Amino acid sequence: MIYSESYEYDNPSYPWFSGPKAAAMTQALQDELPGDVEIAFAPVARSLVFQPILGDPSQNNKFGDSTRANATLLRGDRAGALTVTVRQSTTPIPPCVAGDLDERRHLPDGTIVDTEDTWYELRGARTLSRTATGYLPDGTVVQANATDRDDHGSGRARAVPLAIDELVALVTDPALRVSAPVPPGTPDPPETCLPFGESGPAIDEAQARRWDEVLAGIPLDGVTLDRPLGALLPGHRGGGLCQTVQVTTPGRQSRLSLVISTAQPLPKEPDHSSYDRATRRLPDGAVVETSEQRSPQSRTVTVTRRSGVRIEVSSTDAAQEPLPLALLEQIALHPGLEVS
């Protein structure tokens, strides 16, 4: 089963922020990373993608007032973490107090950047930390914090992945300002998908990229997506690799989700098929399951191959009719979606 974590980006309490704004900021942040830095293969929410600002500031907002992007960064044979937050502020810039920061920089455009290179210890474990906080002329506050933590479990040696000057470059990027315009046609950021069920073993990035190439080449005649298929990432709570996109074809708007997992058992064929659920076995031994649901309206095709690879493709929408089962089968049965 596939679920999407679709927190709303358009929070009326923060009118400067939206889905396209988050996507534009995400692209700018990722483009600003040094060329030898990679983002670790991880779910959307841990892939340096700015997340929604939740809650209402008038109701003692426990979620905070900033959007956050975080990831494990890989640089050479080292790994460390980066977290970047962006918020709008109307309060004065805090005074420069000795001991609270290492340096305060005054830039020609009026931007002020505070930096700190330090460490902290928790339960006997020491963590190295570097931080740059930018106070920009339009009221934007951008903070970038890099540590030598490796929450991804990459197995590489721990190191703070960015230098202080590289963090300063991040927090002063004009595209991260609250007032920065969003390029026309910018879509929302990718959705966090949540596949549930038997997760099977982890699938590495190399296999994901091979499947990405296959998915990108599947013809979807008459269907327009907000982004191409072929950007698989691990599910937020395990369950294989997944991707969720929006169908933007007029009159057919819906959510299209797919998940691929491995080491899955072949399902047992039922004695009969109902009006909303059917199962059949193909000559090569693969089992195809189809189902339809009325509330919310959805259609799902699941293909389990003898190798244990399972491909589940779903189309869901509360108002529009989901995509036809034949199209979902076309995706799920496309040659090449096997372990290679």
Image: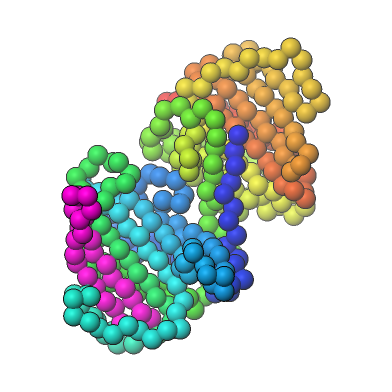
- Position of residue 17 measured from the top left corner of the image (x, y, whole percent): 54, 70
In the displayed structure, would residue 2 be above or below residue 274? below
User: Residue 208 lies in what quarter of the image?
Assistant: top left
Tell me if residue 337 can be seen.
no
Residue at left offset 62%, top offset 28% = 302
Tell me if residue 226 can be seen.
yes
- Position of residue 115 measured from the top left corner of the image (x, y, whole percent): 24, 73
Residue at left offset 31%, top offset 73% = 133
Looking at the image, residue 225 sits to the left or right of residue 106; the answer is right
Q: Main secondary structure of the magenta part?
A: strand
Residue at left offset 68%, top offset 41% = 315
Q: Answer whether residue 69 is magenta in the image.
A: no
User: Residue 188 lies in what quarter of the image?
Assistant: bottom right
Q: Residue furthest right?
A: 275
In the displayed structure, would residue 107 be above or below residue 129? below
- Position of residue 126 measured from the top left corner of the image (x, y, whole percent): 18, 53
- Position of residue 120 measured from the top left corner of the image (x, y, whole percent): 21, 59
Q: What residue span does the magenta drawing correspond to?
A: 112-136
